Image (spheres, helix red, strand yellow):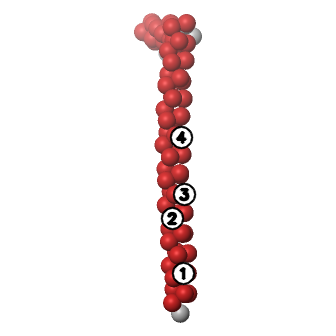
Amino acid sequence: MITKKNVGFIGAGFLLGTLGLKALTSKPAKKLYVQGVSKALQVKSAGLDIVEQAKSNLDDIVAEASYLNEKNAADTNSVQ
């Protein structure tokens, strides 16, 4: 059964939805979205830089460890 109270809630919901849609598509809202995406891209870039530095450091460590292993193997072979 539809009552005046239910019709009021339906009307209020429709009005809030319409106003919300207008607010989400307004110029200030779009400006805010652009700024948010810009900051997210900056964070992504910084994160990728950190990962790249970590990879570089790991490559250096692996190269030094390989060198030490080869040196130790050569030293062991020369003693025998």
Helix or strand or loop: what does disc 2 sit on? helix
Where's residue 16, x and y in %? 48, 10
Is residue 50 something one can see in this rendering? yes
- Closer to the chain start, of discs 4 and 2, is 4
Q: 10 Å neighbourhood of mark 4: few (<14), some, or many (≥20)?
A: few
* Secondary structure under the numbered disc 4 in the rendered image: helix
Q: Distance between the residues labelled 2 and 1?
A: 14 Å
Q: Residue 48 carries which label?
A: 4
Query: In the image, residue 43 lies at what x, y percent?
Result: 49, 32
Residue 41 in the image: state x and y as whole percent.
54, 29
Q: Which of marks 1 and 3 is nearer the N terminus?
A: 3
Going by the numbered disc 1, the residue's amino acid type is Ala
Mark 4, mark 3: which one is toward the viewer? 3
For disc 2, the marked residue is: 64
In this rendering, would 27 be left or right of 8? Answer: right
- Residue type for callout 2: Glu
Q: How far apart are marks 4 and 2 (CA)?
A: 24 Å
Q: What residue type is labelled 3?
A: Asp
Q: Where is residue 24 in the image (x, y as percent from the top left)?
A: 53, 13
Mark in the foreground, 1 or 3: 1
Q: Name which of mark 4 and mark 3 comes first in the sequence.
A: 4
Q: Which residue, given by chain and number where applicable, does mark 3 sit on?
A: 59
| Residue that numbered label 1 is attached to | 73
Q: Which mark is residue 54?
A: none
Tell me, yes or no, whether the two marked residues, 4 and 1, touch with CB atoms within 8 Å. no
Q: Closer to the camera: disc 4 or disc 1?
A: 1
